[in-house]
Image: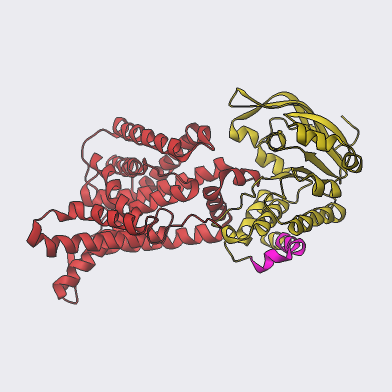
Amino acid sequence: MSFFFEVLLGGLLAGVMYSLVAIGFVLIYKASGVFNFAQGSMVLFAALTFVSLLERGISFWLAFVLTLLAMVALAWTIERWVLRKLVNRPPITLFMATLGLSYIIEGLAQSLWGAQVHGLDLGINDEPFEFQGMLLSQFDIFAACVAGVLVLVLSVFFNKTRTGIALRAVADDQLAALAVGIKLEKLWLIVWTVAGFVGLVAGLLWGARLGVQFSLSLVVLKALPVLIIGGFTSISGSIVGGLIIGASEKLAEVFLGAYIGGGIENWFPYMLAMLFLLVRPTGIFGERQIERV
Amino acid sequence: MPVGALLHIQNIEVIYEKVILAVQDISLSVAPQSIVALLGANGAGKSTTLKAISGLASAQRGEIVDGRIEYQGNDITTTPPATLVERGLVQVLEGRHCFAHLSVEENLLTGGFVHNPSRHKLNQLLESIYHYFPRLKLLRKNLAGYASGGEQQMVAIGRALMSEPTLVLLDEPSMGLAPQIVEEIFTIIKNLRDEQGMSFLVAEQNAGAALRYADYAYILENGRISSEGDAEHINQSEVLLASYLAG
């Protein structure tokens, strides 16, 4: 039984790592109703910039701040040269734009910093420790705490601050937001910057785990089922979705794998997401379309 | 420009997507502290005219290709919407366009951000909106998406009023509403004009209701102004009926 809980807890903690990536998607989806395909590239760009600065002998915090500035510059460029041209276009147009952006950002990161694999050491001990007879990863617990703080800060931001309320307004109705004098350009810059920051945090944690390399941009694929289960519009949904995915894929691997062969981890989340789409297409916490009759 | 007009439009022509001619040769004025009605059938160009004034036409790929628009004596033909709201010119969109997933109060708040007021000032503004629309105070915590049509119209107007406007452009406030709600809303508009000194340019298909409260009226037909006059005069003449039937 204690083995079961060990697998479960390990899975839950690993799931939080998926949530970190998913939160970046939710932010931009909430503010513009667009699925930002480039989020994975932003994670990669952030991690690669950070690690390259670190390797050039810059201290941890200075590198963090410089990377953050780079993410702001990236957000500014995207807003100025892509989003502003596409105001009030259908969401699919914006989605295609982010698809293109994704490749541009990846290419940019590559031409700036090269294509080799970098190791990243955040100075967190990844040795498992024993808790009530279970072995848990310190690194995962650290990541879970980071995610918890992020969610708390973001939910206060969206519900209590003026910028947050304005962002939700823009997500609901761009034309009406323009009509009441909300400056879309400013808000998009803010939300892409915040998404860049979340991308940086996710990039650091994932980079420390997998090494900073181009496959890092593929973690978005693991964030997809998280988004479908949690709902595209809910930050707490992406946490819950991440927990469900993390726990279920590990449990399936360990307990079902023995019967139907290993490697379940790789496809189980997608199957789970598909089941959710059948039962609850907006996800657990997703906003339903409000239609009055 | 007529002396002392708050808003003056001179021969504007608006084209969408560079090819679709929406309105042509439109001229109209709004005097301070007045209610002006812009009447016409569906597709006559009322919404386009309002959006041209508020700057929202350009967000929908419309363009003012000819003529000019003056507000408080300044040319605003190409001024972006947010700047106009800062200067006291705000539009309430056709079909209400409430932020469905925001509470009624949050909807109102979004309208107040433009001047970056203090928290105290923001609360004062909210209270004054609740004074004119007491029903909204009861609904303040509810999601706007679930409010009734009339309530949503009140939210949309209240939200615009939060910016403390001088001139409000109202697009079809009566659309889809029961007659007594329409009267209620027009009465509030009249009170706002009398007590706050605001001006309103109201686009309406419902000519009967609009003319009862307006001071002056213009009739739009196929993208052009076909006639104008004091509301009372227009109401009694045959031009109105003719314009609707001719369409």
- Left/right of residue B5 with respect to residue A124 in the rendered view: right
Q: Residue B77: where, in percent of width, then height?
A: 72, 30
Part of the protein shown in magenta: B124-139
Query: Chain A drawn in what color?
Result: red
Q: Residue A226: where, in percent of width, then height?
A: 32, 55
Q: Residue A248: where, in percent of width, then height?
A: 23, 62
Q: Is residue B181 magenta?
A: no
Q: To which quarter of the image does residue A124 belong?
A: bottom left
Give the colour scheme of this rendering: by chain
Residue farthest to the front?
A: B245
| Residue A213 in view (yes/no) | no
Work out whether residue A280 or residue A217 is closer to the camera in this orientation and state it. Answer: A280
Work out whether residue B3 or residue B45 is closer to the camera in this orientation and state it. Answer: B45
Q: On the rendered image, what quadrant is the N terminus of chain B found in?
A: top right
Is B78 above or below relative to A227? above
Query: Chain B drawn in what color?
Result: yellow
Q: Residue B47: where, in percent of width, then height?
A: 69, 38
Work out whether residue A42 or residue B22 is closer to the camera in this orientation and state it. Answer: B22
Is B57 above or below relative to B232? above
- Left/right of residue A115 with respect to residue A101 in the rendered view: left
- Left/right of residue A173 with respect to residue A288 in the rendered view: right
